[in-house]
Image (spheres, rainbow, N blue to C red):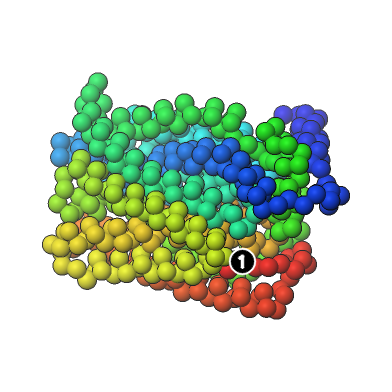
């Protein structure tokens, strides 16, 4: 694209953004009923689509865990047909984690400065759909590594892009529930992944293709078919939404401006960037999310394997992974709603992650043959690890040092997912299977309790910051969320 064309596009988008009425010049006061109606209107246009496409994103990311053991009794699993060992499998997931960590920040930068959210997220979705489809035809380790790296590249920017998009539309006290609605779809993805895995297990060798190939082909095609929904149906920002009146646009803008939030293409100052990346409180947010994501990634990649160790066949194990994910989905929505309602994200996350840690600790202490009790622990873990994620993401966006670094903070936080993925894939070695994976259970229990300690510390810190009237990086006095 030429510089002239690029300048014209930016000029058009800037003109669109400037069409918002100035709320400060308008004497009309927006009542609670009006705001509630407007929020519901935004929810109907934005949330179902965001949740659905993130479900597809997580489904395509975690399906490798389902394919790993699918039809292994007949020698037709993903590992067996690609001649991979469990160490090779861990290497593949590590490569994905590296790509996922590196490309979060560049993706959000592109979305902030150059491309509309609907176009950029639609492009990423098309790319990972094609790559997932390609997984249905892999023959060897080299091809698997190459495709998995590319999937990491294009999937890296998707969730932080959605989080960034949510900050264009919602105030601080509204975000955790909306992010939970999106993130909780990952729990549904786990449930759907188990159901799909169970179904395609019976398609093994149909048309000469193994069950795991049908798994990748079906899920990849579904993603590709749904790309136009994002490109043409996903709202970008309030200023250009044709389904909003001028008064509604002004109402949204006035609420976001009061919290130094909303969409902007302004460049962040050096101080704002440094504070977003390196101040102790922001690093604490990122580290807490990393430690919790170690647990989430462990469940995404290894739940079918763990359940299979409880005595179920590979196909049945796919189905038995469904109930914990469904329970996790329900609890996620309830916890996020309560966290926003009481403005108490730290305490809610602390309770949830402690519950998760207790579940893993119980797995460490239970006898190896206590199958029913270990399966029950999965429910306990699902009610802790999944629900804590969305309030943590929302908490970061509420306390970002500057509006101009909102996209950077969302990307930095999500970049820890890749690092956590690298850690999680090496703590469940096949050699631990006979002992019911003590390494994975101990590490995940420790990670959960570390998260609990960090978020309690952050809760205390923000309480003190509000009492002191601490300013943000732009020199603005803020009410810090806790």
Look at 29% across and 42% down and name the residue there. Answer: 194
For the N terminus, the image quarter is top right
In the image as oriented, which residue stretches furthest toward the top? Answer: 207
Q: In the visual, does 354 lie left or right of 119?
A: left
Q: Quadrant of residue 282?
A: bottom right
For the C terminus, the image quarter is bottom right
Q: Which residue is mark 1?
A: 481
Q: Position of residue 327 (x, y in %)?
A: 34, 53
Answer above or below: position of 480 versus 383: below
Number of other residues with Cα within 10 Å of mark 1, as a class: few under 14, some 14 to 19, many 20 or more: many
Q: In the visual, does 423 lie left or right of 438?
A: right
Q: How many marks are shown on the rendered structure?
A: 1
Answer above or below: position of 304 versus 292: above
Local secondary structure at mark 1 = loop
Q: Nearer the viewer, residue 19 or 450?
A: 19
Q: In the visual, does 37 lie left or right of 382?
A: right
Look at 77% across and 52% down and name the residue there. Answer: 29
Look at 26% across and 32% down and name the residue there. Answer: 200
Q: Nearer the viewer, residue 332 or 221?
A: 332
Q: Position of residue 116 (x, y in %)?
A: 66, 36
Look at 86% across and 49% down and name the residue there. Answer: 25
Residue 210 visible in the snapshot? yes
Q: Position of residue 188 (x, y in %)?
A: 38, 44
Q: Quadrant of residue 199?
A: top left
Q: Nearer the viewer, residue 93 or 455?
A: 455
Answer above or below: position of 398 versus 234: below
Residue 114 visible in the snapshot? no
Q: Position of residue 133 (x, y in %)?
A: 40, 30
């Amino acid at each position: 694209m030429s510089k002239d064309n690029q300048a014209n596009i930016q000029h058009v988008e800037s003109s669109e953004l400037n069409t918002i009425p100035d709320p400060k010049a308008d004497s009309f006061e927006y009542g609670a009923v009006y705001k509630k109606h407007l929020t519901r209107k935004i929810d109907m246009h934005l949330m179902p689509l965001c949740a659905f496409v993130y479900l597809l994103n997580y489904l395509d990311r975690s399906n490798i865990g389902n394919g790993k053991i699918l039809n292994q009794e007949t020698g037709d699993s993903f590992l067996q047909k690609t001649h991979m060992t469990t160490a090779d499998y861990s290497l593949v997931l590590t490569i994905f984690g590296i790509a996922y960590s590196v490309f979060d920040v560049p993706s959000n930068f592109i979305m902030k400065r150059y491309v509309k959210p609907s176009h950029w997220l639609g492009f990423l979705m098309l790319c990972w759909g094609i790559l997932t489809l390609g997984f249905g035809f892999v023959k060897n380790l080299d091809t698997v590594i190459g495709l998995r790296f590319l999937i990491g590249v294009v999937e890296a920017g998707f969730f932080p892009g959605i989080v960034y998009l949510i900050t264009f539309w919602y105030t601080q006290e509204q975000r955790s529930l909306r992010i939970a609605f999106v993130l909780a779809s990952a729990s549904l993805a786990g449930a759907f992944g188990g159901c799909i895995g169970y179904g395609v297990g019976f398609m093994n060798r149909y048309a000469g293709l193994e069950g795991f190939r049908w798994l990748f082909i079906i899920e990849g095609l579904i993603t590709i078919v749904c790309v136009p929904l994002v490109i043409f149906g996903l709202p970008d920002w309030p200023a250009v939404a044709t389904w909003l009146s001028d008064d509604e646009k002004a109402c949204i803008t006035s609420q976001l401006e009061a919290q130094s939030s909303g969409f902007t293409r302004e460049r962040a100052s050096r101080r704002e960037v440094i504070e977003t990346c390196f101040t102790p409180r922001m690093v604490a947010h990122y580290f807490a999310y990393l430690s919790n994501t170690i647990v989430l990634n462990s469940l995404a990649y290894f739940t079918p394997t763990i359940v299979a160790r409880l005595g179920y066949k590979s196909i049945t194990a796919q189905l038995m992974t469904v109930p914990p994910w469904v329970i996790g989905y329900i609890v996620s929505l309830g916890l996020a709603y309560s966290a926003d309602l009481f403005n108490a994200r730290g305490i809610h996350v602390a309770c949830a992650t402690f519950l998760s840690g207790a579940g893993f600790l119980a797995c460490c202490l239970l006898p190896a043959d206590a199958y029913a009790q270990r399966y029950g622990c999965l429910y306990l873990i699902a009610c802790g690890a999944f629900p804590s994620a969305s309030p943590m993401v929302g908490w970061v966006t509420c306390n970002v040092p500057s509006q101009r670094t909102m996209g950077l903070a969302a990307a930095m936080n999500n970049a820890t997912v890749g690092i956590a993925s690298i850690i999680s894939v090496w703590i469940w070695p096949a050699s631990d299977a006979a002992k019911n994976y003590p390494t994975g259970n101990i590490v995940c229990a420790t990670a959960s309790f570390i998260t609990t300690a960090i978020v309690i510390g952050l809760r205390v810190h923000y309480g003190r910051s509000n009492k002191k009237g601490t300013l943000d990086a732009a020199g603005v006095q803020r009410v810090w969320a806790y």
